[in-house]
Amino acid sequence: MRWIGEEYQSEEFSPRTRQWFHRVIVSSMPTIMAAATIILLSFALGACKKTSPDGGQRVARFLKCLDQGKSAPPDQRATLVSDCVSREQLFARANCNAAWKTSQTAPPDERWRVIAKSCGAQYCSDLKAPKPELCRHLLGPGPQSVTPRQWMHFHSAILSLDAGGHLSKEHQSKALGALAGVLLIRVPAPVPPRK
């Protein structure tokens, strides 16, 4: 069995070359190994950065917040949901949570746009194909209206990405129902064109 650097112990290398090898390579081996470990860990953490194991816990806290405010009158339900999203940090990316809070200052028929633009900017590039229809619209001139189906698909993809498999179907369904309820309260149904 040969050891690292053993081939440099032969007579064909000068003592000076052997010293250099020992000083630079062998004595630096712990540093080299530490650097390699750091590089490997940074790649591993970079791959995991987009999902969060506590995504399921955030959804559970959000649902608990909603449950505590369930006696809120229907006209305050949208405010309650937005407050719970921002307070409990439902989404892993802070700008998306902040958009839910700031949307309260926008006119009711524009609130969904504030949320969609901010959350879309944070998430659409990271969502798997096929991307939600709302993401495709946000890349262009932007949609004039949004359907509940588009809204649900958009937020379902975001919650799934954030939770990384740590979200129960029941919690996801309840959270999406609350988020869609806000859409229905805030956005009037599109008026069909006259014939």
Image (cartoon, rainbow, N blue to C red):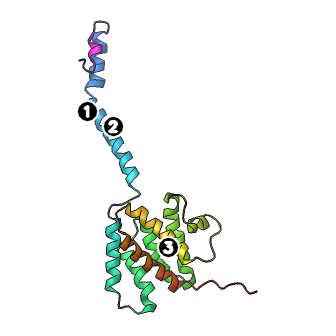
Q: Circle 3 is placed at which residue position? A: 152
Verify whether residue 186 appears in magenta.
Answer: no
Left of 193 or right of it: where is 147? Answer: left
In the image, what residue occupies the spot 34% across and 67% down? Answer: 56
**2 above or below 140?**
above
In the image, what residue occupies the spot 32% across and 64% down? Answer: 54
Name the spot of residue 90 as percent of width and height, x first: 38, 71
**Which residue, as the protein is rendered here, is positioned at the far top?**
11
What separation in Å lies between label 3 and label 1 (alpha carbons)?
Answer: 51 Å
> Residue 134: which quarter of the image?
bottom right
**Disc number at residue 123?**
none
- Name the element at disc 3: helix
Q: Circle 1 is placed at which residue position? A: 30
| Depth order, front residue of 159/186 | 159
Residue type at numbered disc 3? Met
Q: Earlier in the sequence, mark 3 or mark 1?
A: 1
> Residue 135: which quarter of the image?
bottom right
Q: Which residues are magenta?
A: 2-11
Q: Earlier in the sequence, mark 3 or mark 2?
A: 2
Residue 107 shows in the view: no
Residue type at numbered disc 2? Ala
**155 above or below 44?**
below
Residue type at numbered disc 1? Pro
| Depth order, front residue of 113/66 | 66
Q: Circle 2 is placed at which residue position? A: 36
In the image, what residue occupies the spot 43% across and 89% down? Answer: 76
| Depth order, front residue of 42/169 | 169
Q: Specify few, some or many for label 3: CA neighbours under 10 Å numbering under 14, 14-19, or 20 or more.
A: many
In this view, the mark in front (3 or 1): 3
